[in-house]
Image (spheres, rainbow, N blue to C red):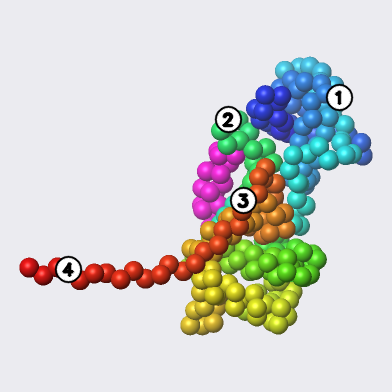
Amino acid sequence: MAWTLGDGAAESADCRAVDISDRGMRVECGREIPVGLVVLIQGHDMPGRHATVRHCTAFGDKFRVGLEMCQDESFARYSQPRQDDVDFYEALQINAKADPDTIHRVYRLMAMRYHPDNPETGDVETFLLLKRAYETLSDPERRALYDAARDSKESGPLPVFELRDFVEGVQGEINRRLGVLALLYNRRRTDPDHPGISLLDLENRMGFPREYLSFTMWYLRSKFFVDLADNSDFSLTAAGAEYVETNTSSSEPLSKLITGGFWKPTRERSEPMHYERPKPQLLSAPATM
């Protein structure tokens, strides 16, 4: 359970469910929680839900807290992803073949950064997402089931590309470019030894025919945002990576491709950055004595 106080400070506490109903639940907690406070609760098999504290009663050395589930989530600061929308490997920014030690090490570092008790970078929703990803990937049986479901989803197009935003008009073309760059960005970040993706794989992941992507790939190569390897795989360049980071932060569908399904809107939208390949500079010959 996590919450944000009036001064902006984020706090959290572990709790144990005592009973639950359609409208709310009662939990046992080691801390007293103010009545009327809105909290975010999440469990092993329970997605993040907001609830209002209706009562908090001392019970031995602990407290029994009554929670009423919020029916209107419009007040939530961030969008809460469904588990099916989240890629746990991308959320932790690790390769799908990462060993248990790597998963544990990366999680510890990221959890420390986003823990609600961290006054500088604490973030309740991100911390809970990372915790859920770690609990799944650190358990061999749960990871095997997750990997099987993930592999089956990867055989078809990503749901985000079914949106009209990627199809209609000039804006659809712009979004397709960013979609390709986002896929290549994730591949290079999580598998730097094999950063390339073939055009066929891009077609399958985006659900577009090759004719839809020919203009897109021509543009990206002309701007030097992508490279074409000898094996015909496309990979991201440094200019392409910077373009992605500049242009996807305010777009929910595109940012979900980068963050593994978890998105936060930004306060201000940065102007798109355009890059041109640096022109070679002529070096003057050294003066002769």
Instruction: Say left or right for 30 vs 183.
Output: right
Task: Give the mark, 2 or 3, whose residue is nearer the N terminus.
Answer: 2
Task: Give the mark, 4 or 3, whose residue is nearer the N terminus.
Answer: 3
> Is 105 within the magenta?
yes
Cα separation between marks 1 and 4: 81 Å
SS under mark 3: loop
| Amino acid type of the residue tagged 1 in the rendering | Arg
> Is 192 within the magenta?
no
- 4 or 3: mark nearer the eye: 4
Cα separation between marks 1 and 3: 41 Å
Q: Residue 44 lies in what quarter of the image?
A: top right
Q: Residue sitting at 70 percent across and 25 percent down?
A: 5
Tag 2 residue: 119
SS under mark 4: loop
Q: Residue 18 at x, y = what percent?
A: 83, 31
What is the number of the mark on residue 54? 1
Tell me if residue 54 comes above or below residue 223 in the rendering. above
Q: Residue sitting at 59 percent across and 60 percent down?
A: 244
SS under mark 1: strand
Tag 4 residue: 286
